[in-house]
Image: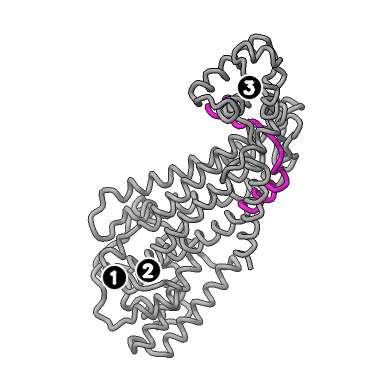
Amino acid sequence: MWGGRFTSGPGAIMEEINASIDFDRHLYRQDIAASKAHAEMLAKQGIITADDAKKIAHGLDTILSEIEAGKFSFKRALEDIHMNVESRLSELIGDAGGRLHTARSRNDQVATDFKLWVRDTVDTIDKALAAYQGALAEKALTHAATVMPGLTHMQTAQPVTFGHHLLAYVEMAARDRGRFADARKRMNESPLGSGALAGTSFDVDRDMTAKALGFDRPTANSLDAVSDRDFVMETLAAAAITAVHLSRLAEEIVIWSSPLTGLARLSDKFTTGSSMMPQKRNPDAAELVRAKSGRVVGALNAVLVVMKGLPLAYAKDMQEDKEGAMDALGALSLSIAAMTGMIADLEPDTARMKKAAGEGYATATDLADWLVRTLKIPFRESHHIAGRIVAKAAEEGVALHRMPLAAMREIEPRITDDVFTVLSVDRSVKSRTSYGGTAPKNVRAQAKKWLRKLEKERS
């Protein structure tokens, strides 16, 4: 492609480090779509003939069919997807194929192709996250009143419901989808027509190509257009946060499914055995989701480091933007699918959850609140009284709701037997009716609200 300036070809090592076809072949659909839009615009503007544009479009359609049928021969000597397509196009249609690259550079071509690929991937991830939210909300509705231990510092805190716990991840996924949507909105400007860095002297219609490719508008600065990879970094940032959220739930599934807690069970579909120990049921799917978050976070770090020292405009360093991003977004998509399946598959042990919810004096805050409401004791003092009662219960080895009234009165004489109305885990969760609280009626309402919203999105 640059034979006029050079008297010999690249060395073997140069060819090896320079080639990107092994991964950028995944851009073939986007490359062909952008090339068809470019050719149509060139013909409309009188830059190439209508006959050449027709030949180009037909040739590109043929190449698309060959690639999708597995009959296309990718050549590493041609470096990348762009030159592989252009070379094959010239084989198919002759000189007309060489006219396709008029008024464009590989710099604006690759920026356009990769934007289109990232945009398509964001749309796929958004649909996957919506399905994940749906699985969570369905399970939350089923278990709106299933009591489980709520933890802080991995220590017993207050009883919550399993449904409430799952809805927390629905909210996280909503923010994840919002970040991807924001990234998509900002990336939706077309670099095509920016040339190598300075634009082009040909009378191109960049609005036409932008519209044809579904962009909102063309980019306003040619230097920025070919050197911008914010759309990759921002998408990977959204992906990294999403992966962290998935990893947190994966960690909880690992904990819940351990025999040490026995709070929930995954079926054989999402567990594996041991080559030595016949009793094992390992939550490998959850562990792999947890691990893949490192790959996604690593890809974000990698592209940030690649871009941090680059002056305008394009530099070959930017070839390193694709392989890690493609791998990371693929890993994220697989993780979302796996987590969606695990949530649908997960079966809580409701009796064990309820028992665990009552351990560790989880309703001590309810006791303190009762002292405030009923006896009008300032909260800081009621907190101290409740703490003394908990210490006494621990000393006697009894649960808080089993503590004799007389023993409580030794610490606070004004306590009445009405206090027992707040000390069970069921009453505790039912009392948390504040907006966003864990009361079963709240959980049912929120789960139904999310399911309606997700259904509306699909229609």
Which of the two labelled residues, at mark 3 and mark 2, occupies the earlier sequence position? 2
Q: Residue 85, can we see it?
A: yes
Q: Quadrant of the C terminus?
A: bottom right
Q: Mark 1 points at which residue?
A: 220
Tag 3 residue: 361
When asked about the image quadrant of residue 422, the answer is: top right
- Residue at x-position 36% and y-position 86%: 48
Q: Which of marks 1 and 3 is in front?
A: 3
Q: How far apart are marks 1 and 3 (CA)?
A: 62 Å
CB-based contact (under 8 Å), mark 1 and mark 2: yes
Identify the residue under disc 2: 189
Q: Mark 1: which secondary structure? A: loop
For residue 346: magenta?
no
Numbered badge on residue 92: none
Query: Is 135 in the magenta?
Result: yes
Q: What stretch is highlighted in magenta?
A: 132-156
Question: Residue 135 location in percent, x, y?
Answer: 66, 50
| Amino acid type at image mark 3 | Tyr
x then y, percent, for residue 40? 42, 83
The answer to whether residue 390 is left or right of residue 236 is right
How many residues crowd around disc 2 within 10 Å: few (fewer than 14), some, or many (20 or more)? many
Q: Residue at x 28, y 57 (%)?
A: 315
User: Which image quarter holds the N terminus?
Assistant: bottom left
Under tag 3, what secondary structure? Answer: loop
Q: Say which residue appears at 34% left-offset and 89% top-offset.
A: 46
